[in-house]
Each structure stands twice: as structure tokens, then as C-alpha cells.
Amino acid sequence: MQIFFVPYFYIELCISFLIQTLIYMRFSLLLIKTITLTLLSVTAFAQQEAAPKPCGTSHVMNKLFEQYPERKAAWLAQRNAPFAVNDTASIYDSVLIIPVVVHVIHNYGPENVSDAQIFDMMRIINEDFAKINSDTNAVDPVFQPIVGKTKVAFRLAQIDPDGNCTRGITRHVSALTASADDNVKDIVSWNTSQYFNIWVVRTISFNAGAYAYYPGTVDPQYEGVVCLASQFGSMGASSPNNFSARTMTHEIGHYFNLAHTWGDTNEPGAQDNCLWDDDVEDTPNTVGVADQGCNKNMMSCGVKSNVENYMDYSSCARMFTNGQVTRMRTALHSSIGSRNTLWTLENRLATGTNNGYVASICAPVADFDAATRVICSGKTSEFTPLIGNVASLDSVHYLWTFEGGMPNTSTEANPVITYNSAGIFSVKLMAYTSGGADSITKENFVTVNSGTAAYSAALGISESFEESSFPLFANNLDKTWSIVNGPSVTSPTWQRNVAASTTGSASIVIANALLPDNALNSIITPTFHISSVGSPVGLRFKMAFAKTASNNKDQLKVYVSKDCGKTWQGVIYSKLASATGTPLSTVGNTNYYEGTSFVPTASQWRTETVNINNYVQYENVRFKFEMKSAGGGNLYIDDVEIVTVPSVGTAELIKQYEISIAPNPTNHNSQLSYVLGKQENIRLQLTDLLGREIWQQVQPNAAGQQQIDLPMQQLSAGMYLLHLQIGNQSLSQKIIKN
């Protein structure tokens, strides 16, 4: 039987079973499959619900054994011999206390989970492993007699590897959180023979919810669990549903040498699963739950299935069996993977997890962020401290220093600072408690532009990047462009270059291959007084990009702001390297250039025009070009300008694209229908009558009939506007919500 955590259960279990199948060599023809299950709804990072993702244990195990075949042979040799079930009393006679450290890898998004969410996860795993979870009594009476109690407890470490005071939580800023795997373990890993390491991330690179390695199969620094913030505990960025809340329970099962209950495949529901098992005597032979349901009467392999097992893929996981407990505690008494050193008295004393340990008051770890980093003079920005390693923020004192700000110092927790002069300014924060102090300075953190638009007669203005000091315009600071690099990015991002251009001798370029995957780096225009320009009007620019491989996922987006960059109203342009139709690449979707070698010829540029009619009435409009790097080639931009665009009447557009919205008026949702003659991206934006954005999306469509559900049900009664942008053409339609 194999174990998997509930949130990822379905996925992880599938993966884990596949791995074991390959490991045992029982199913030489069996391929590893990733089963995407429709799980209970989970609160995702966006304001929408998404299904929890599958377990990734099988994926990483198979990848490991492909790279190191000798490790597979060694693991097969030790798979059951060293872990042979030992029913002696010593296996059960004490509570084993496991020191835990949680490493939060974040990029200032919701994946920067709160201490409270971490404590919630710790509560859940301690209840599950102690058999005091509130739903234990709901276990099917048939399986009540074999519900296991592990006598394993998890405690956040209070002493770090250097002997310093810790809360058992570390926080590290890295773009890798958006494409995480073992790469985040290279950022930070505490001695895995002393600490059970957990890494919390935003996205796992192979679309899993979490994963763990079996004991002793991987280099020591990679032991532990990587878990999505959205499947970590039952609150905050996660969800209270069974799958997400029990993901860590499932993954720890793998970490303690459990497999999925149906055996060594990643195919729950397959009848062939009856031929295999999970090497645990009291888990009934089963095919596994394939639909993520909770049918407690499910029969398979001639017996009743234990669908409530943490290592199956049901939505009601709530138990381990006695046999699984024996297997886990046997692993904890084995030297394989150093599980037997975690719970010793010597290690508990070294990590501050022994009974009776009185924690010290730790020195804080300082960090901060701001609501707005690019503003116009005379405007304000609010700053938020992000203080780690403290029991309560009430114990923290602050001293802020704001270059160019008013006031230029503050002792408030969340100061609101006014910037009256244009410039690029640093911010410093010192945080201190009775346990010590820490400070952090962020250079060039706030960019302040003049309150007067750089271009008051925007039409016809073209920026071809000929200024040698670009992005700085020494003779007119109002025309200076702003470069905002993502956190943890140290390599140069957007730069002026003279290797390629369409007008003059220069353009700007970003070398994606040199940047971390999923790093977001932006370059922001000066301000435009577009209200002085008649409509229709568009933003036009020329760009060139080449891929380095077929699976590149680099993406260019353009955002617009109507308040000088304080807020960004939405995406007005978006193209992805791997997209069909009109992809980002300007040299063909199957032509690749190694690394940073791409330098476009005259024929390898493409002109893009984006309709910006919705922003004509505003005086301080800015545009942000945001590049999401993912290993692709160089991307160039030249000749950014404001231009007039051809006007087509609304009636003609409705007829041309067969546009309809029904029902309208509506009591619930409405559906937008239209027909495309070719593949192209459609931008949709729903606003109220004051122009405030409610919803938007860029829809990559194939040719033919298209139908999009509009989220009207959640809105209050009233009139709304749906704005459609199709290529260089746009129109708006009224929708009435009753």
C-alpha cells in the first residue's frame, strides 16, 4: 500500500505508486502518469477556486532513478530488508518528537504564508499522527478497530544549526517560488539529520501539489517535503477542504516510507491494481479512488476499500492503519535517511524541542514591501513591515528612513510617506525587540516621477532609445523610464543595446536566458497626457523574440496605469512563447537560438498595436512592459509610440464577429458569444460605470465559435460595461444585472 497526502493525495499517490511500480520492476510496461483529479474546491491565490494539485513523489523518484540508476538498485535492495516490520515493544514505547523547520520561499505574494497558517498546519499533522483529529470518530466502523496511532509529534525548532534562537520558520525571497522543485533546497536547507525540512512555495515546476523522497534515496540536503502554500494547512492561502488540509499528512507518510494504498502504480481505479499492494498487511487490497469522491461502501479486489486512508485519493481521508504506523515507526528507528537521529534526546536538546525547553526571545529578521513603488510627485505610498522570527509583532519597534520622503523618518509600523520631488530613492528599516535588532536597506526602491506628464501632446511621440544615458534622460528627468526588477534578481534585466534596432541605432533588450525562471522584470514608460489626443488611439511598439527550446514559457505583458503608475488597471497585451496562433516568437515557433545569441535582422521584427481608447480621458497614463523570463532567448523592443488606429463602427464589429450577450438583462451569469475568422487573442474587461475594473482576462482563441461565461452572478444590481478588444479594434457593450 502506498501513502499520499489528501490534498495532493490523489496526485501524489498516483505519482508515488508509479514510482514504486518502476522501483519494484513489477510493471515494466507501466508508464508514470500524472492524474489530474477534480478535487474539492480550494481557495487559490486569485479570487477564484481551483482544484488541489496531485502528489509529485512518483515524478521525482523516477527522475532520480533515471539520473542515478545505481540508487534504484540500492533502494530495491534495502526496500524491505532494513525496513522489515518489527513488532517489538521498543518500536512503540515512546512518543517520537520530530524537530521541524519551515522555509517559506516567496516573492512577496500570497505564498508568503503567515505564521498562523504554519501553526495551523502543525496542529493538523500533530492531530492526525496522534489520532486525535476531530473526524476520527467518523471512520467507517469496519475499519475502526485498525485505526493507528503513531505516537509521533512535530515541534517547530527553537534553536537553529548555528545555535541561535529561532522560531522554526525562515523566509527567503526568490523568483524560484513560481517554478519550484529541488532548486529551492539549494537556497536553504538545514541539516536533515537534525531537522525535518519543509519548503513552502507558490508553484511546483511539474504541476504537483507537494512531494517527498523516500528515506535514503536522495542526497541528504534534499530530504524533506516541498508543498504549495495553497495546500498547506486549512487557512490563509490554503483551504479547509480535506485534500488541501491533509496534504502534509500525506507527504509525511511518504517521508516515513509509506506508499499509496493500491500499490506501485499511479493509476487509481485501474483493475490491475488488485495484483499489487503497498507492503502493509492490514490495508485492504484496492484499486484506489479514481474520482476523488468518498464512497465508504466502495468494493474493489473482492473486499471493502479503506477509502478514508490518508494514502488513498478520496476526499475524506482521516486515518492510518496499525500496519502503516508500524511501517512508519520502523523507518523512524532505521539509520536509512537518518530518520533515527531526528528524535533522539541529544537532537531534541540541540534543536530546542525537548520537553520543558523555555524559548528565548529571538532577534527579529527585517524585511518590508510597499503598496506602490512607482508614483508621481506629490503622491503617497504606504509601507508594510514583514518581520520574521518574532512571537508577536506587538513586541517589535521600528525605525524607518525614507530618502526623499516626507517625513523622512518614522517609528510607525505602517507609515504613509509623501514624495514631493522626482527621483529614485532608497528605504531603510530597522526592527528591534528585547532579543536583538536587524536592519535592511533597499536601494532604488521608490521611483517618483514629476506630476506633469512628460508628453502632453502624446500623439506622434516615438521613443527609439537613442539617448545614450537611457533609461535616464539627463536633460529632462520627466522622460526617464523606470526599471523595476523582481526580488532576488541580481543579473541585469532591461538594457539599452546597439546590436539591433528598427529606427536609429538602438533598442532595449532583456536576456531571458540569464535570468531565473519566472522572474518578473518590468520597464515603465514616462507619463502621457492622452486626454489631449483624439480617439481612436493606440499604443504601438516593435518587438523581436526567439525561443531557445520548444517548451519555453516566456511571456510579455503590457499593463496600463491612469494614475501615474500607482495602480495598474489591467493587461492590455499578453503573448506567450509557447502559444499557438500568433505566439511571442517573431522568427517562427520552431526556430531556436541558443542562450543569448539571438540578434534580430530587419525581417525578424513585428509591429504590435494595442487599442487604448479606454484611457484617452486621463492625464497621467503610463505603460508597463513586464517580461516573465523562462529560459527563452533575447527579447527586443523599439519604437514605442502613441498613434491613431483605424476606427470601425460598433454595429459593424458586432456583425463581423457575430457578438451577442445572453441573457441580458440577467439575474445570474451571462454568456458572451462571438465568432473568429482566425486565431487571435481577445481581451475582455468588465467595469462599472465609473470605469473601475471588476474582471478581466486575455482569451487565446482558435478560429470559430467562442463562448465565455461572464461572472455577473456575484455583482450587485445595476448597469455594467463589457469592453472587448479584438486585435486593433474595440467596442463596449452594456450589461444589466437585475
Image (cartoon, rainbow, N blue to C red):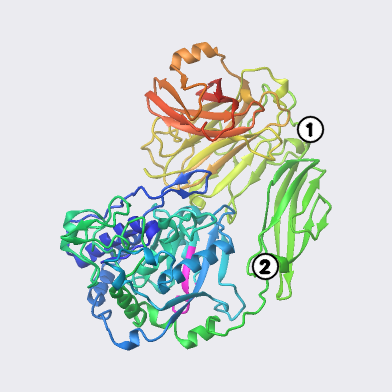
Q: Which mark is residue 326?
A: none
369 and 602: which is toward the camera: 369
**Seen in the image, is 177 located left or right of residue 620?**
left
Residue highlighted by disc 1? 452
Label 2 or label 1, whichever lies nearer to me, is 2
Q: Secondary structure at mark 2?
A: loop
Residue at (71, 41) in percent of width and height: 472
**Dot 2 alpha-carbon crowd within 10 angstroms: few under 14, some 14 to 19, many 20 or more:** few
Q: Main structural element of the magenta stretch: helix, strand or loop?
A: loop
Q: Is residue 611 visible to us here?
A: no
x 61%, y 30%: residue: 640
In magenta segment, residue 195: yes
Using the image, tell me which numbered label, if any, was put on residue 392. 2
Residue 137 place in picture, x, y as percent: 38, 66
Give residue 106's position: percent from left, percent from top: 55, 57
* Residues in magenta, as a range: 190-199
Residue 497's quadrant in the figure?
top right
Distance, label 2 to label 1, CA atoms, is 44 Å
- Report whether 294 appears left or right of 360: left
Image quarter where the C terminus lies is top right
Could you tell which of marks 2 and 1 lies nearer the N-terminus?
Answer: 2
Amino acid type of the residue tagged 2 in the rendering = Ser
Q: Nearer the viewer, residue 582 or 212?
A: 212
Classify the position of the N terminus by image quarter.
bottom left
Residue 695 as seen in the image, left or right of residue 592? right
In the drawing, does residue 314 fall left or right of residue 109?
left
Return the residue nearer the eye: 600 or 111. Answer: 111
Type of residue at label 1?
Thr
Q: Secondary structure beneath disc 1?
A: loop
Q: Is residue 331 above or below residue 496?
A: below
Q: Is residue 223 above or below residue 598?
A: below
Picture layout, residue 241 above or below residue 621: below
